[in-house]
């Protein structure tokens, strides 16, 4: 689970921050008197002025912002509908060669996803978190809403329209995931919740929206998994849904057009997480109706080391899980996910795989993709919140990547799983991207191989396979020169396999400007750390391959600066590039 505590961003700003599961020595126990529970994102406001509190209690249908100076200036727009359009001619010159996707808000944008229309390579759609602040005259920052917005291109990435879908009555959204079907219909899943005045998140659910015009307009969301209760209230049966992902059958099977969503269904009793199995739903009518949620993470002796009470072989201790569904051309569904295993006083993750050959009616027992990854307590340096991070940085990290499959003739059905591994697990990180492959439907997996050996950290990988059968992997790369006096800088790199077997890779830098995370405007705690290192840039990045073979990458970019209420720093933008 993720929980959040209130901390100072600056002398004139108070916001709440997310908590990662990587402080695992706490064994997922929550002290309700000291915290409020949140999503994977920055959470609700505290100490709001009366006027801000009143706005928090009402549905927000439009917004404006004003800021005292700043390189981006004020922004504005509607929660539902087109907000603005960014293009190569309007974006800052510092983004030349890349696409600055967002233009609607002076606040941060992070945790990106991207998809390309299989019927139109010029139609690319990305999405991210968007943080909506009330910037008031007293120079206090009150966070009113976190939602997810889309960035839509119909001209091959030359311009991007910022679109705010309706999202229904939900006020806080996270974990955006996009998937086109084979006919160009676009589906978007999110974790979504309501809020209380005290700042806790309630009824944390999974929703899906659909667009039939390439991302410009969207239908009202359908709640496919309903959450229940608020963790910090000490409820005896709280359901908290987390870390969704979405996939669509675009093959030739009888299940073509089916939409599948997976997530971690976390249960809490008296503020303690008791289980977090992976759940699954499907729709066969274009997202209009959905099945009831079904537990698919199964049982196996592989899960006998979870270190908790309950059935010793039930694979139900997956926390966020980072489930990754894909669909083969024959309709087989594969889902990879992380599962906790006790290692002394901490937990590390193994990666498991389940499959369904009948459209999700029945599922195999879990099989291993990877043994234990070095991602437990003591394997990484930690930030001021106790989350795993990288040396010189503060932003939280995860080992998870994703599952990908080739549909090319040369290696049809070959599976790839990518992840991050700390090669020198200790207080000093050396995190590199790894890949393992399977040529027998996931029954066996190759010895993991390095994508590129480096002394510079690599994190947040994402893989996709093109029509040539070669896997591409995008990742955050610290092989960049930081400005003088800065300890944490990064860029984005794309690796392309030299052969279908992914035995070696060629890499290229796709960002055109270095991100500076140690001089951030958002998500810092100078009184504790003595610096302005951000502790959140999202939990993943994304890449996608178009029908013309184009490779699109997206990431949280921190090259640009803003000045909000007298303090300047590097902001967070949603960025994209054609690799």
Image: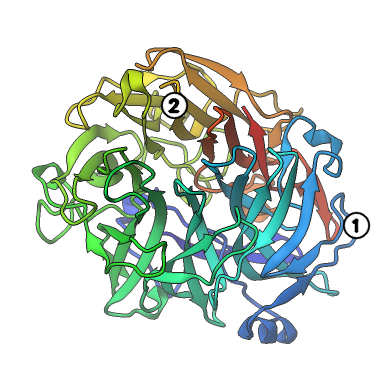
Residue 87 is left or right of residue 354, and the answer is right
Q: Residue at x 57, y 61 (%)?
A: 42
Q: Which residue in the structure is indicated by mark 1?
A: 69
Horizontal and vertical percent position of residue 536 = 57, 49
Label 1: state its secondary structure: loop
Q: Quadrant of the N terminus?
A: bottom left
Badge 1: how crowded within 10 Å, few (<14), some, or many (20+)? Answer: some
> Which label sits on residue 134?
none
Please identify the quarter of the rendering in which residue 278 is found: bottom left
Horizontal and vertical percent position of residue 280 = 29, 58
Please identify the quarter of the rendering in which residue 12 is found: bottom right
Viewer-nearest residue: 219 or 383: 219
Q: Quadrant of the C terminus?
A: top right
Residue 470 is left or right of residue 578, and the answer is left
Circles 2 and 1, Cβ within 8 Å, touching? The answer is no
Q: Which residue in the structure is indicated by mark 2?
A: 433
For the view shown, which residue lies furthest in the right direction? Answer: 69
**How far, Cα to Cα, is label 2 from label 1?**
40 Å
């Amino acid at each position: 689970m993720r929980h959040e505590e209130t901390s100072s961003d600056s002398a004139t700003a108070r916001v709440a921050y997310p908590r990662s599961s990587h402080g695992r020595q706490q064994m997922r126990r929550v002290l309700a008197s000291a915290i409020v529970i949140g999503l994977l994102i920055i959470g609700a406001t505290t100490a709001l002025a009366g006027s801000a509190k009143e706005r928090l209690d009402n549905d927000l249908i439009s917004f404006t912002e004003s800021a005292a100076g700043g390189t981006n200036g004020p922004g504005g727009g509607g929660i539902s509908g087109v907000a603005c359009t960014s293009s190569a001619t309007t974006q800052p010159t510092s983004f030349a060669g890349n696409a600055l996707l967002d233009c609607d808000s002076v606040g941060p944008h992070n945790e990106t996803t991207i998809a390309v229309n299989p019927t139109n390579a010029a139609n690319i759609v990305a999405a991210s978190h968007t943080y909506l602040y009330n910037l008031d005259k007293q120079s206090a920052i009150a966070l009113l809403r976190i939602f997810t917005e889309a960035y839509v291109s119909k001209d091959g990435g030359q311009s991007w329209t910022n679109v705010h879908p309706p999202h229904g009555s939900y006020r806080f959204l996270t974990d955006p995931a996009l998937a086109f079907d084979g006919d160009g219909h676009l589906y978007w899943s999110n974790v979504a919740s309501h809020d209380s005045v005290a700042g806790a998140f309630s009824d944390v659910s999974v929703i899906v929206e659909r667009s039939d015009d390439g991302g410009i307009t969207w239908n009202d969301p359908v709640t496919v998994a309903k959450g229940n209760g608020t963790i910090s209230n000490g409820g005896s049966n709280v359901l908290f849904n987390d870390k969704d992902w979405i996939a669509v059958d675009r093959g030739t099977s009888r299940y073509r057009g089916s939409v599948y969503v997976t997530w971690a269904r976390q249960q809490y009793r008296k503020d303690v997480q008791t289980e977090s199995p992976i759940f699954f739903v499907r729709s066969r009518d274009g997202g209009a109706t959905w099945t009831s949620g079904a537990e698919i993470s199964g049982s196996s002796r592989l899960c006998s080391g979870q270190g908790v009470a309950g059935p010793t072989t039930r694979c139900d201790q997956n926390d966020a899980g980072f489930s990754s569904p894909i669909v083969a051309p024959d309709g087989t569904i594969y889902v990879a996910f992380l599962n906790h295993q006790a290692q002394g006083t901490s937990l590390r993750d193994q990666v498991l795989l389940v499959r369904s050959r009948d459209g999700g009616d029945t599922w195999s027992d879990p099989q291993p993709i990877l043994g234990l990854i070095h991602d437990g307590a003591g394997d990484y340096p930690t930030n001021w919140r106790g989350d795993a991070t990288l040396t010189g940085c503060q932003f939280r990290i995860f080992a998870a990547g994703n599952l990908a499959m080739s549909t090319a003739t040369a290696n049809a059905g070959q599976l790839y799983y990518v992840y991050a591994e700390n090669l020198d697990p200790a207080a000093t990180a050396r995190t590199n991207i790894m890949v393992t492959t399977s040529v027998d439907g996931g029954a066996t997996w190759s010895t993991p191989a390095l994508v590129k050996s480096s002394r510079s950290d690599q994190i947040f990988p994402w893989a996709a396979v093109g029509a040539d059968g070669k896997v591409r992997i995008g990742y955050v790369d610290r092989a960049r020169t930081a400005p003088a006096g800065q300890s944490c800088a990064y860029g984005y790199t794309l690796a392309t396999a030299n052969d279908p077997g992914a035995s070696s890779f060629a890499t290229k830098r796709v960002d055109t400007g270095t991100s500076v995370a140690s001089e951030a405007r958002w998500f810092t705690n100078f009184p504790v750390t003595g610096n302005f290192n951000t502790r959140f840039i999202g939990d993943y990045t994304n890449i996608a391959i178009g029908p013309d073979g184009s490779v699109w990458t997206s990431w949280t970019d921190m090259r640009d600066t803003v000045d909000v209420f007298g303090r300047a720093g590097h902001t967070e933008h949603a960025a994209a590039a054609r690799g």
